[in-house]
Image (tube, rainbow, N blue to C red):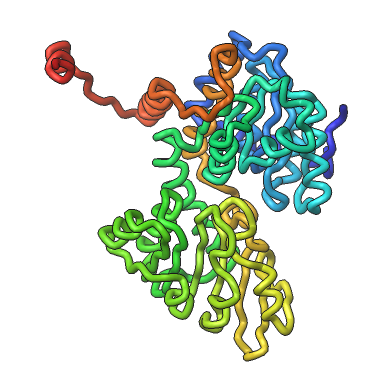
């Protein structure tokens, strides 16, 4: 089966991008050196569905070097970079992806990837798992297991697990301690503002930023907004997270109240209709809406379109909606992930941690699948600590170790 990409001639510039990120991913480099020799994934078919940019491409190449037959498709219509897709294809990875896919093309590419009959999957958002429990359920029996990258995907997995319908074991990489502390907080925090600022070319300082959701991603976005000089309002449904936001120094309001105050809105909940008609009706003229949750359902685009008298793209990744009362509201990146659709995603050093964790998860599935049940597993403490230790070493840091006497003291009854 041949790759389906936009333009193979873009491969050289895509390889430049991959080689650049490789320089800043020491943990993944360490694993690559080990796995290239041992080939523990030899003969295994592997499908990766993720945001197809340079860091993801390097993960795919590491797993290929470990012996796997790798197929890759995008997990978001606007996050695939065509030059990176071409570069991966030139390196012997099957790629089914291009930038700005239609809904039909996106689904077709997922099916093409599954046509390679994977043994192991790496999912981002749960679309692969959904297909394997629906239209492509005939392949589910061959799946040894897989891993999931995002909060949204893990929610979907736990729903399947909770109802006893999960057909193969899955590792919730998103719930690894290293992952949500660093990727979700620092990665999302930086990359979301990178996407917003490079797209709008506007200041953040002095503005009122409304952050919907105070999970680890929301914490990161709020922290960075505060650091950029914004006044930050948090909206939440969870009382514990809400009081945490208060104790962290933020204002907490219901969205209906926050909607009238915000200049920039960022949704990070994983739920639908976080911002909808009743909120848009009271927003300030010029309010900007962006989503950093997984799917483009957090900001109700149908409500926004229904309110608009006219709509037009005024700058790449910025759509203006002129309302009948003369107000203009702006939506970034079609309500899709602003950090990837309008940026380059998380910083490379952050994804070094996350993708090293994905690599260990894939290896764990390959080596232990016979003893795993069809349920959602969390990353082991051993895997978490190994990734953190490798990262510390790469950054030039060392830490203390317990003496035998200290261990005895801590562990005595």
Above or below 229: residue 308? below
Q: Which of 387 and 309 lies nearest the eye of the viewer?
A: 309
Residue 231: image x %, image y %?
Answer: 37, 71
Q: Which residue is drawn at 64% across and 14% down?
A: 41
User: Residue at the front extreme?
Assistant: 163
Name the one closer to the observer, 323 or 396.
323
- In the rendered image, which quarter is residue 116 located in? top right
Q: Is residue 324 above or below residue 386?
A: below
Q: Which residue lies furthest to the right in this view?
A: 1
The answer to which of 167 and 28 lies nearer the viewer is: 167
Is residue 198 something that shows in the picture?
no
Which residue shows up at 50% across the image and 56% down it?
268
- 246 vs 39, left or right, is left
Q: Nearer the viewer, residue 314 or 11?
A: 314
Residue 287, percent from left and from top = 54, 76
Q: What residue is drawn where x is 87% and y is 30%?
A: 2
Looking at the rendering, in which quadrant would you find the C terminus?
A: top left
């Amino acid at each position: 089966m041949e790759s389906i990409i936009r333009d193979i001639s873009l491969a050289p510039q895509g390889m430049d991008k991959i080689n650049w990120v490789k320089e800043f991913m020491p943990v993944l480099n360490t694993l690559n050196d080990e796995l290239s020799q041992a080939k523990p994934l030899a003969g295994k078919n592997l499908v990766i569905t993720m945001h197809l940019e340079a860091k993801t491409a390097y993960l795919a190449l590491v797993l290929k070097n470990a012996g796997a037959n790798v197929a890759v498709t995008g997990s978001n219509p606007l996050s695939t970079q065509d030059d990176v897709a071409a570069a991966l294809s030139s390196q012997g990875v099957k790629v089914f992806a291009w930038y700005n896919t239609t809904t039909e093309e996106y689904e077709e590419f997922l099916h093409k990837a599954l046509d390679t009959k994977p043994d192991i999957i790496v999912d981002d958002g749960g679309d692969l798992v959904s297909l394997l429990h629906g239209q492509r359920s005939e392949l589910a029996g061959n799946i040894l297991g897989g891993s999931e990258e995002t909060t949204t995907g893990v929610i979907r997995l736990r729903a399947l697990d909770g109802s006893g319908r999960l057909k193969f074991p899955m590792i919730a990489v998103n719930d690894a301690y290293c992952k949500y502390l660093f990727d979700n907080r620092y990665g999302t925090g930086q990359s979301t503002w990178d996407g917003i600022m490079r797209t709008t070319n506007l200041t953040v300082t002095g503005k009122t930023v409304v952050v919907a959701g105070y999970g680890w991603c929301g914490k990161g976005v709020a922290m960075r907004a505060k650091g950029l000089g914004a006044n930050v309002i948090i909206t939440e449904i969870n009382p514990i997270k809400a009081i945490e936001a208060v104790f962290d120094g933020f204002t907490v309001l219901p969205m209906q109240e926050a909607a009238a105050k915000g200049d920039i809105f960022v949704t990070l909940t994983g739920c639908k209709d976080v911002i909808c008609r009743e909120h848009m009706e009271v927003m300030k003229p010029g309010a900007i809406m962006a989503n950093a949750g997984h799917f483009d359902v957090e900001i109700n685009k149908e409500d926004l379109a229904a309110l608009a008298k006219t709509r037009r793209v005024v700058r790449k990744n910025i759509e203006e909606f002129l309302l009948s009362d003369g107000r203009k509201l702006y939506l970034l990146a079609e309500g899709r992930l602003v950090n990837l659709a309008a940026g380059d995603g998380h910083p490379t050093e952050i994804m070094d941690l996350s993708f090293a964790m994905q690599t260990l998860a894939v290896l764990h599935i390959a080596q232990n699948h016979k003893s795993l049940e069809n349920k959602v597993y969390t990353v082991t403490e051993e895997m978490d600590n190994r990734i953190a230790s490798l990262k510390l070493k790469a950054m030039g840091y060392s830490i203390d170790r317990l003496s035998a006497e200290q261990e005895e003291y801590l562990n005595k009854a």
